Structures are given as C-alpha cells and as structure tokens.
Image (cartoon, rainbow, N blue to C red):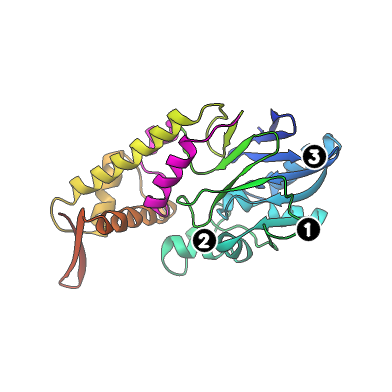
Amino acid sequence: MYELTQAGPRSYYLDAPTKIGIYLAEADRAYLIDSGGDRDAGRKARQVLEQNGWTLAGILNTHSNADHIGGNRYLQNQTGCRVYSAGVEAAFTRHPLLEPSFLYGGYPCRELRHKFLLAQDSEVTDFSHESFPQEVEVIPLPGHFFDMVGFRTPDGTVFLADCLSSRATLDKYGVTFIYDVAAYLETLDRVEAMEAPLFVPSHAEATPDIRDLARYNREKVHETAERILTICAEPLPFETILQRLFRHYGRTMNFQQYALVGSTVRSYLSWLKDGGRLEAGFEDNLLLWRRN
C-alpha cells in the first residue's frame, strides 16, 4: 500500500485506496494530485516525497470528495503548501460539511459526520492563480461531482479522478456515485476519445487504453437507468424505488449507502424525468414516480 509507481518520465502515483498522483515539476519540486482520505494518507505521501528528496510544492485537487482531500489540512499545516481547486469544488474544500449535507439533503446526523464523508477544511487557491503550474493541463470532467477535473502532466500522463469505476466495482455494486448523469455520459464520451501514454483513474488500474473501461461504465449507467424504469412500472415513492434497487443489486442499507446511493438515484430520476422517460406527480402528499 502507498507503493510509488512511475507513470511517465516525471509522473508517478501512490497505489492506495484513492490513488495519489505526483508530478515532478523540477529536480526536487513535486505536486501531489489529491491527498488521500485522511491525515494518515497525507503523512504517508509526505514520507514518500521525503524519501526521494522531493519538496512538496502544492496539491492539485481533482474534486472535493473527502477521500481526495482528506490529507490536505495535514500537509498544509506541515509544509505551508498551496491547495489548488476551483468552482464548487473549492467551496466544498473550504467548507467540507457541505459534502455530507448535500448527500443527505439536510444537516447530516452523526453517522454521516466521519472522515469518509467529512474531511477537514483547507485553504484553497484557484487554478487561475499565477503560482499554479501552467504546464499542467486542467481537464474538465463533470458528472461524478460538480466541477471535477483531471490533469494531464507535460509527459502526457492523464489523471482521471473518479470519472471511471473499475469493472470489479461496477460488477459488485451495480450503482456508483453520480451527481449529474447527463454530464457524466458526456464526460465518458470525451474520455473515450482521449489518447495518452497512460491513464490513471483514482479507483481503477492505470492503463494506456481507457476505451473499454469507458464503454463499460457507460453500459452500467444505462443498465441502472433501465432497472429504475422497470421498477417504476407503477407509481412509487423514492424510498420504495431505492429499496427495490438495493434488493436487485444485493446491497445492504446503512446511513452512508443511503446518502451516497440515494443521492445518485435522485439524480437518475431527474435525468429520466427531464428526458421524458419518467413522470412525477403528487398523490396524498407523496411524490410518486412512474415510467412513461
């Protein structure tokens, strides 16, 4: 765990639950791409940098999910480095209570206020700031989260954040977190058309050919949409739709799964309704969803 793997002449990643990328800008100045899920991840990343004689120049955050920004505060406190982000992601990074609040749809109960959904806050510098490494390309990858981005380093290595899940994850869980289904599908189209010496997704194996995995992720999105449409053959409230989806995929409900999968299912319902495939109406003070 946290083994340093070379991805390109000046690009590396730490193989961890959430991969941490490293771009070596100069002989000893390194930028992290995300910081892992907690203080311990940040500490391990710092140890790797020190073992190689590299100085932390900054952290480039792909997005504000807690497993990507959890090491920010520790590393900022230890080194004074800048953390770079933009848009909604910057707001969530400054105010991380926004993540569990958004997922739950209100103030999150204790079971949702933990490090997997609630990181420590950190100071943020916008990508447009003059100190940002201008040779690194910022690639918009919306869909999984609000303003998620990826990065292409000068040696061509592309860090893809969470825009792709591994086949194993998709086969095991069926539904993975998506905020905006339409934007996510457009991002998959964009990623499938990309070329690079190596692609490094945060939660899948690094590969020089990302096309098959992009297609598989797209297939799973449409499979989930069809399952929801099948469930909604009769008018049903959200809670029943979620329950039946969990039963179909053999998943067990808890607070974290309720928040993550529940938020995703609401996004699917919006996408299907806006596309004319679902209709929604209120009966006896219940919002019911039904296939058109």
Q: Please give the range of residues in magenta.
A: 167-196
Q: Report x, y in % for residue 130.
A: 76, 59
In the rendered structure, which disc, 2 or 3, sits on the residue that comes first in sequence?
A: 3
Specify the amino acid type for callout 2: Glu
Residue 290: which quarter of the image?
A: bottom left
Is 286 a magenta residue?
no
Q: Is 7 situated left or right of 51 in this image?
A: left
Measure the C-alpha gap from mark 2 to mark 3.
Answer: 29 Å
Where is mark 1, residue-wise? Answer: 77
Specify the amino acid type for callout 1: Asn
Q: Quadrant of the N terminus?
A: top right
Q: Which mark is residue 90?
A: none
Secondary structure beneath label 2: helix
Q: Report x, y in % for residue 3.
A: 69, 30
Where is mark 2, residue-wise? Answer: 99
Which is the main secondary structure of the residues drawn in magenta?
helix
In the rendered structure, which disc, 1 or 2, sits on the residue that comes first in sequence?
A: 1
Q: Are there few (<14), some (14-19), or many (20+) residues within 10 Å of tag 2?
A: many
- Name the residue rendered at 55%, 56% in the picture: 114
State the count of labels.
3
Residue 123: which quarter of the image?
A: bottom right
Q: Report x, y in % for residue 89.
A: 57, 59
| Residue placed furthest toward the bottom | 285
Where is mark 3, residue-wise? Answer: 49
Q: Is 145 situated left or right of 252 in this image?
A: right
Residue 154: which quarter of the image?
A: top right
